[in-house]
Amino acid sequence: MASFKHTGRVNPVPDGLVSVGPIVKVTLLPHPADVDKMLAEGVTPKGAIANMMVDTGATRTLIDDSIAQDLGLKPLRLTPII
């Protein structure tokens, strides 16, 4: 098994992790239980592909309101972000 030790040095890559963070392309889909409810209401469930930033220290996951609307999601609760 290989072992690696971090040296504490970071060599920035132009427009890379240091300036914009780790970005991954994700496919967002409604939860299977929500799909059943949507189908019962006559709504066709949709997915969305988005670029998201990975933040290992985050306590919440946020998506843009337009993505939520495209997916037909309705808010269950709102939390102010200060």
Image: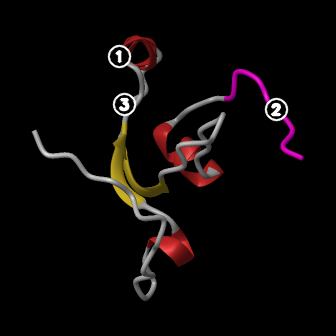
Give yes or no for residue 52 being in the magenta stretch: no
Give yes or no for residue 80 being in the magenta stretch: yes
**What segment carries the magenta color?**
75-82
**What's the colour scheme?**
secondary structure
Chain-order first, disc 2 or disc 3: 3
Query: Where residue 34 sits in the image (x, y, percent)?
Result: 45, 17
Look at 62% across and 43% down and name the residue there: 62
Q: Which residue is mark 2?
A: 79
Q: Are marks 1 and 2 in contact (CB under 8 Å)?
A: no
Residue 46, quarter of the rendered image: top left
Task: Judge whether 22 appears above or below 71 on screen.
Answer: below
Relative depth, front residue between 78 and 34: 78
Query: On the picture, is 55 further left or further right than 30?
Result: right
Query: Where residue 28 sits in the image (x, y, percent)?
Result: 39, 40
**Mark 3 residue type:** Thr
Q: Which residue is mark 1?
A: 32
Magenta: main secondary structure: loop
Query: Where residue 47 sits in the image (x, y, percent)?
Result: 35, 41
Chain-order first, disc 1 or disc 2: 1
**Mark 1 residue type:** Pro
